[in-house]
Amino acid sequence: MKRLFLLLLGCGVFAASVWGRDVVFAGYNLENYAPAAASGGDATGKPGKTEAAAAAVVQVVGEIGPDILGVCEMGPAPQFAEFRQRLDAAGLGYVDAEWVDAADPTRHLALVSRFPIVARQSVADAPYESGGVRMKVRRGFLDVTVEIAPGCRVRIVGAHLKSRLALPGAGNPDLERRQEAHLLRKHLDEILAADPAVPLLVYGDFNDTREQPAIREILGIRGSPQALTDLRLADAQGDRWTYYWKTDDVYSRIDFLFVNRALAPWVVAARSGVYRSPLWNVASDHRPVFATLHPPSTETLPASHQP
């Protein structure tokens, strides 16, 4: 069974065309998908995407074959357009997209979809105060509603919280991340207060591990109607790590997929996981996470989630 799982991953057969009504979502931090020459002056010193790395990213995405792909660390608008062209050339068939232009001019949240985006609620300007200083959530929050089948919609929220890196002249990165997590939780609470039955998926690079305060706040109060569930994804060998920090030689799980109570029954656990590719370290310092969703028939959906 394990070998079959690996073969399925390598052939990219998780596409909806194979599994009928099943839909695959993948979340992926692309590691600074920006021009290599232009990003050398980045405050973090992180280099941009080389041709080899960009090609590897597209190959990894093609192997998974997600119907909806949410990404972190997408570059400015021209790089997003170039990325979409590469995906088109690979025959991946994405027809709609979202790109969030928030406070960070270099790294953006973005999403491509084989299904139409029927509502856009992304937040580009999310201010807060820290130590008397007015600040903004650096990458904002991506927020779209996608119609994944006639009469069936899912809401997707993406985030890329403040890294652990302390930059000269900047504030406390852990405190900033907590503030951003607090605003994200507030945004999710507003979504669920307006429609408690909405199928909700939250993806992103949260730059913290499972039991840290920022993640606990995003998950919400355990057992409450507004709580989210961590899918606790693993690869075919049982490894859960999603990020390799080269500086300290540390592997950790900081990329997550969270679902709410309404969406949890749709998740096909046996066809969800962390994608293990021989090209992962060429493509990015992160590994993609993915979930297969099997939506119920439209007859069982609340009227609010039908067109």
Image (tube, helix red, strand yellow):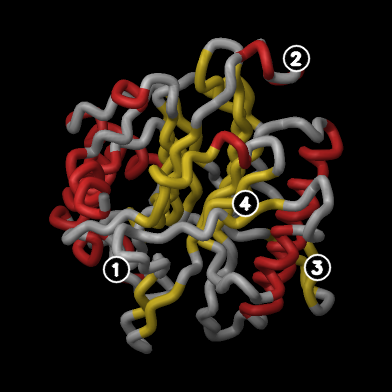
Which residue was labeled with disc 1? 47
CA separation, marks 4 and 1?
22 Å
Residue visible at 71% across and 42% down in the picture: 261
Q: CA distance from mark 3 to mark 1?
A: 30 Å
Distance Cα–Cα, label 2 vs label 4: 30 Å
Q: Is residue 61 left or right of residue 43?
A: left
Task: From the top left corner, tell me how far across and down residue 22 is, in percent.
Answer: 43, 27
Residue 140 badge: 4
Q: Quadrant of residue 16?
A: top left
Give left or right: position of 86 versus 225. Answer: left
Q: Name the residue at 26% across, 29% down.
A: 92
Instruction: Name the residue beneath numbered marker 2.
Output: 303
**In terms of secondary structure, where does tag 3 sit?**
strand
Q: Verify CB contact (< 8 Å) between mark 2 and mark 3.
A: no
Q: CA distance from mark 2 to mark 3?
A: 39 Å
Q: Quadrant of the C terminus?
A: top right
Q: Nearer the viewer, mark 2 or mark 4?
A: 2
Amino acid marked by disc 3 = Glu
The residue labelled by disc 3 is 129
Q: Earlier in the sequence, mark 3 or mark 1?
A: 1
Q: Is label 3 or label 4 in front?
A: 4
Q: Position of residue 142 (x, y in %)?
A: 59, 43
